[in-house]
C-alpha cells in the first residue's frame, strides 16, 4: 500500500477554512506569495477598519483579528507570540477602555474555554517566537483550535478548526494540554476575565536570580601561563593589544570570572529576541514617516536607498549586540548596536579558551555556540562570489576581521581582506576592483555605516543636487573612496544599509513610544521631560559610539559621570538613568549577541567608571544553576 501523500500547501493568502466567529484562516506559505501584489514588507501589514492586526498571515495576526472581530478588543502589539502570556489587559477599540487579561499555566485548575488564546513556549517547531492559537471548542479529552503559520493545507469539508490537542486532567484537578508536535510545549492559555482564580499571580522569578557575582579561581595556573598561541594571527593581534596573554591589565582580574543564573540567562535571551523584533518594528515605522526619519540626521539623498535596502534585505542582518543593565529590580536595555561585530571574538572564542586553560568548569559558557551560529548564518547568506572584508589598520579590527573570516570560510565563502581603500582602483563602468583586479561586489565591513556618512558629509555640499550619490567624479585622478564601494548599487554590504536607522540612538524614543509597557525598555525621549529630570537621565548623542560623549545626571541634575569624544555636535536623546550594577568594585554591563536576528550568546564588560567604553574589560561569564548561583558570594 502506498503511503498517504500529504496534500500540497495552499497558495499564500488562500482561505484554509473558517473558524468560530466566522473568522477566515489564511495560508502563510510565503514561498508562494505573489511578489507583484506583495512587493515589500509594507504590503504584508494587515489592517481591519484601520486597526493594525499584524503581518499576513502569522499566528499573532489571527489572534488579534479574532479578538477584534468577535469581542471588539485587541491586545498590545508584541514582538514574540509567547509574550502574550505576560500581558495583563486588552483594549476596547471603540472607547479605549481596558479589560483584565489573566494567564493560566498549563496544568491550571481552570480549563481553557472558547475564545481563550493558547500560548506555546519558544522551541522546537516554534523556535524563537513561540506560537498562539485561538480555542474554538473544548471537549472532555481534547481542545480544538484555529491557527495560522503552522499547517498551510485546506481543511477537510465540514471542519471548522485547524488542529486538535489532547487534554487530560491530572490527579490534583489540573488541566493539561499536549502539543501534537513532539518538540513543542504549551505554556498555557490566556482568558479575558475578571475572575483570577487559578491564574498566574507572579510571572517573575526570585529577584536574587537576576544578580551578577564575581568569583576567583582557586589553585589556577600562574598568571604567566601561556594560554594563547602567538602563531595564530587572531591571538597575536589580541596579545599585541593587551600587551600580554591577559584579559585585563588589572592584576586582580587575572583569575576572575563572573556568573549569572539560568533564569537570568533565559531573561537575557528572551529580551534579545523580543527587542530585536521591536527594533525592526520601529525601523519600519521610522521609514514610513519622513518627519520622524529627519530626526535621525541621515542625508536625505540616502533615504530612498535606505528604504530600498529595508524592502529588499530585511532578513539579511548577520550580527548585532544589545547592551543591558541586569539588576534584581529588572533587566533594561541601553541600546542596540545593530551594525557592529565587536566583542564577538572574545565571547565566541577567547573566553572559552581561557576557561579551558585555567580549569574553569563551573556552569556553562554562554558564548560557546556563537562561532557555530555565525558559520550557519554565513552559510545561509547566499553569497555567490568573493566576499571582501574591509577594515582599518587597527589591532582590534584585525582580530575581529580574522575571527569573522574564519566563520565565513567555514561556511564555504571565499574571502579577501582590504585595509582601508588600499590598492582599490576603478574598473569598467565605474566598478571598483581590489589590488588584484577582482571586482568588489560583496562586502563585510568592520566600520560602522556612520564612517561612510562622515565621508559623504565632508565631501559633498548639503544641497540636494550635489548630494546625488551617482554624480560623476574624475576617476583618472581620484581613487575609489569608502563611499564609492559601500554605496554602489550592485555591491551587497553586511550589515545592510537600513541598519543605519536601527543602530541610531534616535530609534530609542521611537521603540519606547511603540512599546510603552515593555519591561525591557527605559523611558527615553527626544526632549528632556520632567519625568526624566525626576528620575535622573543619560544624555546620549544619536550617533555616538563606544560610549563616547555620554553624560549622566542624577535626580538633582548634578553631572555624575561623562565621557569625551567626537560626537559632541550631534543631536541628543535623553534616557532614564538606570545605573549598572556594581559588582566587587566594578560596574557590570551584560552584552548579548544576535546572529541572523536571534539570540546567539552573551558576555560581560566591566569598568570602575559608570560608563562602559571601548577600553572596558571583557572578562569570563558563566551561567550557573539556580541553587548553585544563590549559594555563591561575590569575592
Image (spheres, helix red, strand yellow):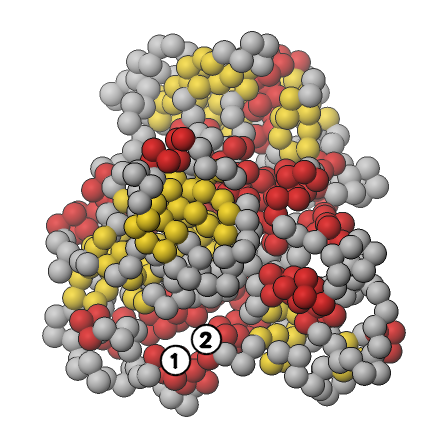
**Disc 2 versus disc 1: distance between alpha carbons?**
7 Å
Q: Residue at x 52, y 39 (%)?
A: 526
- For the question of whether residue 304 can be seen, the reply is yes
Q: Residue at x 29, y 33 (%)?
A: 204
Can you give x and y, in whole percent of width and height, for residue 242 in the image? Answer: 34, 79
Can you give x and y, in whole percent of width and height, for residue 617 in the image? Answer: 32, 67
Q: Is residue 381 above or below residue 513?
A: below
Q: Is residue 180 left or right of residue 104?
A: right
The N terminus appears in which quarter of the rendering? top right
Can you give x and y, in whole percent of width and height, for residue 72 in the image? Answer: 58, 12
Q: Is residue 232 left or right of residue 543?
A: left
Q: Is residue 427 left or right of residue 157?
A: right
The C terminus appears in which quarter of the rendering? bottom left
The one of 552 and 488 positioned closer to us in this rendering: 552
Q: Residue at x 43, y 47 (%)?
A: 539
Q: Which mark is residue 241?
A: 1
CA neighbours of label 2 inside 10 A, class few (<14), some (14 to 19), many (20+): some
Q: Residue at x 39, y 80 (%)?
A: 241
Q: Which residue is labeled 2 in the image?
A: 396
The one of 370 and 179 positioned closer to us in this rendering: 370
Amino acid at each position: 500500500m502506498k503511503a498517504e501523500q500529504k496534500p500540497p500547501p495552499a497558495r499564500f493568502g488562500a482561505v484554509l477554512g473558517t473558524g468560530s466567529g466566522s473568522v477566515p484562516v489564511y495560508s502563510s506559505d510565503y514561498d508562494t506569495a505573489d511578489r507583484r501584489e506583495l512587493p515589500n514588507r509594507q504590503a504584508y501589514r494587515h489592517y481591519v477598519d484601520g486597526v493594525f492586526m499584524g503581518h499576513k498571515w502569522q499566528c499573532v495576526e489571527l489572534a488579534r483579528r479574532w479578538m477584534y472581530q468577535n469581542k471588539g478588543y485587541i491586545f498590545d502589539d508584541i514582538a514574540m507570540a509567547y509574550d502574550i502570556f505576560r500581558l495583563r489587559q486588552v483594549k476596547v477599540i471603540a472607547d479605549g477602555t481596558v479589560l483584565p487579561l489573566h494567564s493560566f499555566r498549563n496544568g491550571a485548575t481552570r480549563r481553557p474555554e472558547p475564545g481563550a488564546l493558547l500560548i506555546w513556549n519558544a522551541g522546537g517547531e516554534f523556535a524563537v517566537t513561540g506560537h498562539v492559537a485561538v480555542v474554538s471548542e473544548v471537549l472532555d479529552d481534547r481542545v480544538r483550535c484555529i491557527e495560522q503559520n503552522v499547517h498551510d493545507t485546506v481543511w477537510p469539508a465540514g471542519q471548522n478548526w485547524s488542529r486538535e490537542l489532547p487534554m487530560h486532567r491530572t490527579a490534583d484537578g489540573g488541566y493539561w494540554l499536549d502539543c501534537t508536535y513532539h518538540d513543542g510545549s504549551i505554556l498555557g492559555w490566556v482568558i479575558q476575565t475578571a475572575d483570577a482564580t487559578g491564574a498566574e499571580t507572579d510571572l517573575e522569578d526570585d529577584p536574587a536570580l537576576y544578580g551578577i557575582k564575581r568569583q576567583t579561581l582557586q589553585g589556577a595556573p600562574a598568571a604567566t601561563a601561556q594560554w594563547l598561541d602567538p602563531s595564530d594571527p587572531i591571538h597575536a593581534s589580541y596579545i599585541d593589544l593587551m600587551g600580554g596573554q591577559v584579559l585585563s591589565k588589572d592584576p586582580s582580574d587575572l583569575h576572575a570570572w563572573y556568573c549569572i543564573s539560568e533564569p537570568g540567562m533565559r531573561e537575557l535571551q528572551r529580551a534579545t529576541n523580543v527587542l530585536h523584533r521591536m527594533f525592526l518594528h520601529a525601523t519600519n515605522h521610522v521609514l514610513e514617516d519622513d518627519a520622524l526619519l529627519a530626526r535621525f540626521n541621515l542625508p536625505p539623498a540616502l533615504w530612498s536607498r535606505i528604504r530600498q535596502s529595508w524592502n529588499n534585505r530585511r532578513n539579511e542582518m548577520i550580527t548585532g549586540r544589545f547592551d543591558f543593565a541586569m539588576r534584581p529590580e529588572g533587566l533594561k536595555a541601553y541600546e542596540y548596536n545593530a551594525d557592529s561585530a565587536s566583542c564577538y571574538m572574545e565571547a565566541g572564542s577567547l573566553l572559552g579558551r581561557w576557561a579551558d586553560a585555567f580549569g574553569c568548569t563551573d556552569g556553562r559558557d554562554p558564548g560557546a555556540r556563537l562561532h557555530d551560529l555565525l558559520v550557519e548564518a554565513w552559510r545561509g547568506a547566499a553569497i555567490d562570489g568573493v566576499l571582501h572584508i574591509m577594515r582599518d589598520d587597527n589591532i582590534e579590527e584585525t582580530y575581529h576581521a580574522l575571527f569573522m573570516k574564519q566563520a565565513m570560510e567555514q561556511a564555504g565563502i571565499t574571502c579577501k581582506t582590504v585595509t582601508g581603500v588600499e590598492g582599490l582602483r576603478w574598473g569598467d563602468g565605474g566598478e571598483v576592483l581590489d589590488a588584484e583586479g577582482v571586482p568588489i561586489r560583496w562586502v563585510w565591513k568592520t566600520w560602522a555605516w556612520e564612517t561612510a556618512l562622515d565621508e559623504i558629509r565632508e565631501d559633498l555640499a548639503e544641497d540636494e543636487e550635489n548630494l546625488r550619490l551617482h554624480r560623476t567624479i574624475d576617476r583618472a585622478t581620484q581613487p575609489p573612496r569608502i563611499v564609492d564601494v559601500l554605496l554602489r548599487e550592485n555591491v551587497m554590504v553586511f550589515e545592510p544599509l537600513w541598519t543605519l536607522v536601527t543602530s541610531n540612538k534616535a530609534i530609542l524614543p521611537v521603540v519606547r513610544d511603540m512599546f510603552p509597557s515593555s519591561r525591557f525598555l527605559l523611558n527615553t525621549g527626544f526632549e528632556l521631560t520632567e519625568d526624566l529630570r525626576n528620575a535622573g537621565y543619560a544624555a546620549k548623542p544619536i550617533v555616538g559610539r563606544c560610549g563616547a560623549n555620554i553624560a549622566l545626571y542624577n535626580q538633582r541634575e548634578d553631572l555624575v559621570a561623562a565621557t569625551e569624544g567626537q560626537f559632541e555636535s550631534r543631536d541628543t536623546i535623553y534616557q532614564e538613568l538606570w545605573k549598572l550594577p556594581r559588582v566587587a568594585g566594578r560596574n557590570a554591563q551584560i552584552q548579548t549577541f544576535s546572529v541572523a536576528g536571534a539570540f546567539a550568546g552573551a558576555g560581560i564588560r566591566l569598568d570602575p567608571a559608570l560608563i562602559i567604553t571601548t577600553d572596558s574589560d571583557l572578562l569570563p561569564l558563566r551561567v550557573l544553576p539556580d541553587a548553585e548561583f544563590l549559594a555563591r558570594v561575590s569575592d
